[in-house]
Amino acid sequence: MKHSRHPALLALSLVAGIIFALGLIISQMVNPAKVLNFLDLAGDWDPTLAFVMGGALMVTMPAFRFILKRPHPLLDKRFYLPTKADIDTRLLTGSAIFGVGWGIAGLCPGPALTALATGLLPVVGFVLAMAAGAYVFKLFFD
């Protein structure tokens, strides 16, 4: 897939990324303790992130349907949507690794990249480990 370097697309991508990062910060998804308390159903459970996720779904679901009614995106010739629909071992394994990592660290890729702005060593370590894992996967499995 060739990516456009159209200035308007780059500017819109930057704005979308900033809005996304602000949403992660405001909702405290960049705070590992908040995420871990959300995942700890048997302990000090904090349900507030369920409202964050529910709010995101309430916006995304109708917007996605509306946008896909268009013949193509505003700044490209076609939509790039996943075509694979089957559930296989690779998908289940990747999902399990993602979930375990999220449960251990309290971070996932988007919030981790946003939290890099804090400069905290555990966050930097997480992002470096995430990048190394992506590199190893690309090297051996892609």
Image (cartoon, helix red, strand yellow):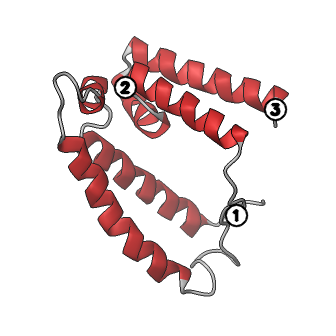
Crowd class of label 2 (few under 14; some 14 to 19; many from 20; radius 10 Å): many
* Residue 36 occupies quadrant: top left
Work out how far the residue at label 3 is from the one at label 2, CA to CA, in angstroms. Answer: 26 Å
Tell me the number on the disc at residue 141: 3
Please determine whether, in this image, residue 59 is positioned above or below residue 98: below
Ranked by sequence position, the earlier of labels 2 and 1 is 1
Ranked by sequence position, the earlier of labels 3 and 2 is 2
Dot 1: element: loop
Quadrant placement of the N terminus: bottom right
Nearest the camera: 83 or 71? 83
Which residue is painted at 26% across and 59% down in the image? 55
Judged left or right of residue 14, residue 86 is: right
Work out how far the residue at label 2 is from the one at label 1, CA to CA, in angstroms. Answer: 34 Å
Identify residue for label 2: 106
* Residue 34 occupies quadrant: top left
* Residue 138 occupies quadrant: top right
Tell me the number on the disc at residue 32: none
Judged left or right of residue 81, residue 101 is: left
Of circles 3 and 1, the one toward us is: 3
Identify residue for label 1: 4
Amino acid at circle 1: Ser
Which residue is painted at 49% across and 79% down in the image? 67
Nearest the camera: 77 or 14? 77
Nearest the camera: 12 or 23? 23
Please determine whether, in this image, residue 13 is positioned above or below residue 29: below
Work out how far the residue at label 3 is from the one at label 1, CA to CA, in angstroms. Answer: 27 Å
**Tags 3 and 1 touching, CB below 8 Å:** no
Estimate the x, y position of residue 111 in percent, counting from the top left: 40, 36
Count of picture labels: 3
Estimate the x, y position of residue 60 in percent, counting from the top left: 39, 66
**Tags 3 and 2 touching, CB below 8 Å:** no
